[in-house]
Image (spheres, rainbow, N blue to C red):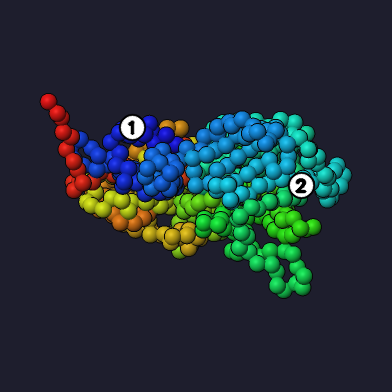
Amino acid sequence: MDIYTVAKADAKTEIRSRRTAKAKVFQLPDGKLRHLCFGAPIHYWTPKGEGERPEHDEYDDIDIRLQHTAAEAEKTFGNYLALKNTFTYGFRDDGKAEKYIGIRRGADNQMEWSLLGVKLGIVPENESESVLTDKTVPTTYTSAEKVSDFQFKHVAPDYEVITDFNEVHIRTAIKTAGAVDDFLIKEQIDLKGITLLNRLDASVKGSTEYVPINGEFRFETTDGHLLWIPTPKMWTEDIDAPVAGSNDIVHRLYEQDGKLIYEKYPTDKGKEWLASINGPVLIDGDTYTGTVADGYVGNTGSIFDSWSTVRNAASGDEYASYPSYLEVNAEYPSTVRSVFRSFLYFDTSAVGGTVTSCSLFYYPSNIGKGAGISVQLGTQNSSLGTGDYDSFSGTYYAYQTPSINQWNELVFSSQGCSDINVSGVSKICLREKSHDYDDSSPSNGYSYYVRLYSADDATRKPYLDIVEPTASSFVPKITWI
């Protein structure tokens, strides 16, 4: 994300010593300070001898745009690398399947992936059960190419491997050529320096299977940085699908012949979701290298539930932490009602003083029925869950009917400015204004929603733009005559 261009900020006025991992501070001409605060890292730490200014220990701007590097003397292939980040992501440029994707922190910490097997299931005509069929894992992919600054694609005869990444994770998804209702995907993980933190299953003698920790497989570098693989998810790009995605997937990590194998396949419920999709699906495996707390909590009623039962519930029935998008809605599309609310976290610890103005900037990707969006104080937990469905307080700071595919600004009220946590994390809640906030049931057949990019997005993450009125560190510009 080019923050300077997006926020129209002059890099020459930035106070580099005031940077945090998720915030920038700028000196304004009148002595005030301007803070740009995010929910995801925008800086990474560079020790003395490295970085943009080798004479300093400081935060540098993250820049994960893929760059090509030629083959070194001892190698026959070059790499596409996303370099300026806490972890480097890399793809070899010769299309070979072995160790075709890598995550690295310096020369001493590496995680490399090789695809071992892909089985996809399709129900044959006049049959009741699908048949898992082996798909080719080529020695060399049909093609391997940089799609964009933040995406790489490997093409095999029967599927594609699409890898997206940002500041905090790299996501590799198998994209099927058509509809499937079952799958089994196996990958090999090679580690150098990085330690697996999960324990072997002690309940089974001689087991080589590792036990997930809260559904995750976790790793640690030699210098204490963490990586983790949460439960995978699958989704469709069909915007008319009744349910866009599912995380009903089993994932396993185990030793086989001295190698570390990662495997994933759908649960019975996941198979039902697959069977409901008529076209291609994407099946992912995220590896996280940092944290993003943004997410949404939703509540969908039964056909017997009234609007008030759904809206006023103490907790929701689903949630998503660090999704690629956030959603607010008030819907009654057919027989059941639903409400979704989004919760955001911003690092405002560098503000320190009184806030005289604050705006939320966000970028919607889709809007239904002219829906409005409101922002108010969030009281959610540090890790989002279904119990955070009603984690908000007070009246709205601002509301608007946003515009799609562009930056929108919500200007906070004085109460919103005073609610900023100037020494920690500021939490906000977004809700659909005309129905959820105003408590007015949508009519049957209507869906009011705003889908916006989250802090997980590489180029359109929300941010707070805050002005602090006085600056004790202000040094007036001296003009020599």
* Spatial separation of the CA atoms under disc 1 and disc 2: 47 Å
Q: Position of residue 147 (x, y in %)?
A: 60, 30
Which residue is located at x 63 percent, y 38 percent? Answer: 91
Q: Is residue 95 left or right of residue 125?
A: left
Q: Is residue 184 visible?
A: yes
Which residue carries the number 1 mark? 8
Callout 1, which amino acid? Lys
Q: Quadrant of residue 480?
A: top left
The foreground one among 7 and 57 is: 57
The C terminus lies in which quarter of the figure?
Answer: top left
Q: Position of residue 178 (x, y in %)?
A: 74, 37
Q: Position of residue 167 (x, y in %)?
A: 50, 44
The N terminus lies in which quarter of the figure?
Answer: top left
- Vertical relation: 474 (above or below) 386: above
- Vertical relation: 23 (above or below) 144: below
Q: How many marks?
A: 2
Callout 2, which amino acid? Leu
Helix, strand or loop under label 1: loop
Helix, strand or loop under label 2: strand
Which residue is located at x 33 percent, y 32 percent? Answer: 8
Mark 1 vs mark 2: give the one in front: 2
Which residue is located at x 16 percent, y 33 percent? Answer: 478
The foreground one among 291 and 182 is: 291
Q: Is residue 346 left or right of residue 160?
A: left
Q: Which mark is residue 116?
A: 2
Give the class, few, some or many, for how many residues have Cα within 10 Å of label 2's Cα (few <14, many ≥20): some
- Furthest-top residue in view? 481
Lower sequence index among marks 1 and 2: 1
Give the class, few, some or many, for how many residues have Cα within 10 Å of label 1's Cα (few <14, many ≥20): few
- Furthest-right residue in view? 126
Q: Position of residue 464 (x, y in %)?
A: 34, 44
